[in-house]
Image: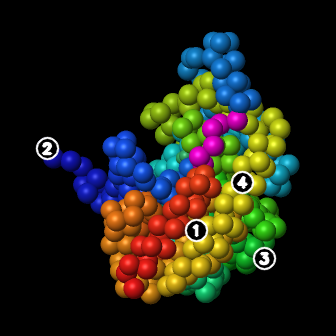
C-alpha cells in the first residue's frame, strides 16, 4: 500500500514501545521493575472521578462546543490568572485531548512547510515529530549537564534565523527533570521579545517541584513576552489523569480560533464527562496534588541516592517532574544496548536516551512504588557491576 510521505519522516514513539515490551513481560509472569512509564502510578483522586460519574448521570453525554465546555474554559482561565499571573479570557483557551494534542494542533495551526521550530535537546520525544508532521523543520540545540540541560539565551539567540517561527520551552522538563529558574526564564523571554519569535511553554509538570524550586511562566515576565507566549498544559501529570485525555492550549484569539477550526474538523470536543472531571480537579481541594508531590519527593531522594551510589553512573539532581536522567557514558555502551541488556538480564525497564537525542543517557521514571524502586536499584547496581 502506498502511504503518505509524511509517515516515513516520523519515528514511532520509543518510550511507548519499551513500556509495551515491559508490560508484555509482566503479563507473562516475569517480575519486571519498570521505570519506563511517563505517568503517575496513583489512581485519579476520588472527587474527580465522582464529578465525571455525576456528569454522566446528568446526561453530559452529547456533543459539546469544539473548544470545550464553557465551565472548564472558565476554570482554566481562573487558574492561569490566579496561579500564573496570565490574563486569558475563556475565549483564549481551547480544551484538547491532552497536552500532546494541544501541541499537535498548535503545530498544525502555526507551522508552514519550511518554518523552523527550535527545540532544546534532550527533548520530549514528540516535539520534533509533530513539527515534521506539520511540514516544519525541527532545529535541535544540544544542551549538557553543565547548564543543567537547559538552553542558554546565547544558544537560543544563535539558533534563530529568519525562518524561525517558534521555540519550544518545557519546564519542569521531561526527560531531565530540570526547572528553569525565574531569572533564566526572564533571560529567555528577553531573547524571544528582541528577536520577535513565539514560544510555546509546555507546563504540564508545573505542580511537581522539589527543594523549593519555583515555576515562572514565561508569559508572566512582561506584556511583550505574554503576546508571544502560547501555553500548553493538561491534567494528566498533576492529577494522575493520563487516561482521561484532557489538556488545553492558551494563546491569542487568532490562534485559538485557528486551532478550534482544526479541532472542529478532526476530533471535535474532548469527551464531555471527562471535562467535568477536569473542572473538579481545578475547582476542588488541591491537597491530592500535594500528597502525590510529597510521595514523588521521597522517591526522588531514594532514587537519586541509589543511582549516584553506583560507580560509573552520574546524575544531576532533578528539581521537577518525576524523572532521573542518568549519564551512562563511562560504560561505553549505547543507550539502547544499556536498556536492552538491563531489561533482558535484570528485568528492569528504563528508556534509552537516544529517544530524547541523548544517547549517553537513560531515563528512569520514579512514578512507581518504593518497593519497586528499592529492588530496581539493586538490580541496576548488579547490571552495572557486571559490565565493568
Ligand atoms: C506527558 C507530557 C505531555 C502531555 O501529556 P498528555 O497525556 O497528552 O496530556 C506533554 N508534554 C510533556 C513533556 C509530557 O511529558
Q: Are marks 3 and 1 in contact (CB under 8 Å)?
A: no
Q: Which residue is mark 4?
A: 295
Query: Magenta-highlighted stretch: main secondary structure?
Result: loop
Image spot of residue 107 (x, y percent): 49, 54
- In the image, 78 versus 240, the foreground residue is 240
Cα gap from disc 1 to disc 2, whole angstroms: 42 Å
Residue 248 in the image: state x and y as whole percent: 63, 44
Please tell me whether mark 2 sits on a helix, a strand or a loop.
Answer: loop
Image quarter (top left, top right, bottom left or bottom right) of the N terminus: top left
**220 w.r.t. 287: above or below:** below
Q: Which mark is residue 1?
A: 2
Tell which tag, 4 or 2, sits nearer the viewer. 4
Mark 2 or mark 1, which is nearer the start of the sequence? 2
- Quarter of the view holding residue 333: bottom left
Comes first in the chain, label 3 or label 1 = 3
Q: Is residue 104 magenta?
A: no
Label 1: which residue?
Answer: 324
Q: Residue furthest left?
A: 1
Residue that mark 3 sits on: 183
Measure the alpha-carbon separation of dots 3 and 4. Answer: 28 Å
Q: CA distance from mark 3 to mark 2?
A: 53 Å
Kind of element beneath mark 1:
strand
Q: CA distance from mark 3 to mark 1?
A: 24 Å
Q: Residue at x 74, y 29 (%)?
A: 47
Task: Classify 10 Å Cα crowding around label 1: few (below 14), some (14-19), many (20 and above).
Answer: many
Question: Is 213 above or below relative to 349?
Answer: below
Q: Is 41 inside the magenta-drawn segment?
A: yes
Residue span colored magenta: 40-45
Amino acid at each position: 500500500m502506498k502511504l503518505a510521505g509524511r509517515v516515513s519522516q516520523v519515528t514511532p514513539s520509543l518510550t511507548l514501545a519499551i513500556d509495551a515490551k515491559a508490560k508484555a513481560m509482566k503479563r507473562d509472569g516475569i517480575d519486571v521493575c519498570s521505570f519506563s512509564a511517563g505517568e503517575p502510578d496513583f489512581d485519579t483522586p476520588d472527587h474527580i472521578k465522582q464529578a465525571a460519574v455525576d456528569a454522566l448521570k446528568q446526561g453530559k453525554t452529547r456533543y459539546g462546543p469544539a473548544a470545550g465546555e464553557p465551565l472548564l474554559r472558565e476554570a482554566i482561565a481562573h487558574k492561569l490568572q490566579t496561579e500564573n499571573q496570565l490574563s486569558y479570557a475563556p475565549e483564549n483557551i481551547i480544551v484538547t485531548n491532552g497536552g500532546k494534542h494541544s501541541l499537535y494542533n498548535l503545530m498544525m495551526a502555526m507551522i508552514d512547510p519550511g518554518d523552523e521550530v527550535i527545540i532544546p535537546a534532550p527533548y520530549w520525544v514528540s516535539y520534533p515529530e509533530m513539527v515534521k508532521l506539520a511540514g516544519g523543520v525541527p532545529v535541535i540545540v544540544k544542551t549538557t549537564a553543565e547548564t543543567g540541560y537547559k538552553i542558554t539565551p546565547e544558544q537560543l539567540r544563535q539558533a534563530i534565523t529568519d525562518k524561525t517561527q517558534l521555540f519550544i520551552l518545557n519546564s519542569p522538563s521531561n526527560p531531565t527533570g530540570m526547572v528553569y529558574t525565574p531569572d533564566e526564564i526572564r533571560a529567555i523571554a528577553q531573547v524571544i521579545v528582541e528577536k520577535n519569535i513565539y514560544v510555546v511553554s509546555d507546563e504540564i509538570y508545573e505542580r511537581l517541584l522539589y527543594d523549593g524550586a519555583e515555576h515562572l511562566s514565561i508569559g508572566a515576565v512582561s506584556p511583550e513576552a505574554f503576546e508571544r507566549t502560547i501555553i500548553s498544559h493538561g491534567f494528566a501529570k498533576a492529577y494522575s489523569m493520563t487516561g482521561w485525555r484532557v489538556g488545553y492550549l492558551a494563546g491569542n484569539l487568532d490562534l485559538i480560533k485557528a486551532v478550534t477550526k482544526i479541532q472542529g474538523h478532526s476530533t471535535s470536543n474532548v469527551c464531555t464527562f471527562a471535562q467535568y472531571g477536569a473542572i473538579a480537579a481545578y475547582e476542588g481541594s488541591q491537597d491530592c496534588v500535594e500528597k502525590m508531590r510529597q510521595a514523588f519527593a521521597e522517591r526522588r531522594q531514594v532514587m537519586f541516592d541509589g543511582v549516584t551510589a553506583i560507580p560509573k553512573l552520574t546524575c544531576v539532581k532533578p528539581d521537577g517532574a518525576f524523572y532521573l536522567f542518568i549519564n551512562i557514558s563511562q560504560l561505553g555502551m549505547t543507550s539502547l544496548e544499556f536498556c536492552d541488556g538491563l531489561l533482558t538480564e535484570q528485568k528492569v525497564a528504563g528508556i534509552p536516551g537516544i529517544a530524547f537525542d541523548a544517547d549517553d543517557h537513560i531515563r528512569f521514571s520514579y512514578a512507581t512504588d518504593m518497593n519497586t524502586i528499592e529492588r530496581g536499584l539493586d538490580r541496576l547496581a548488579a547490571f552495572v557491576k557486571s559490565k565493568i
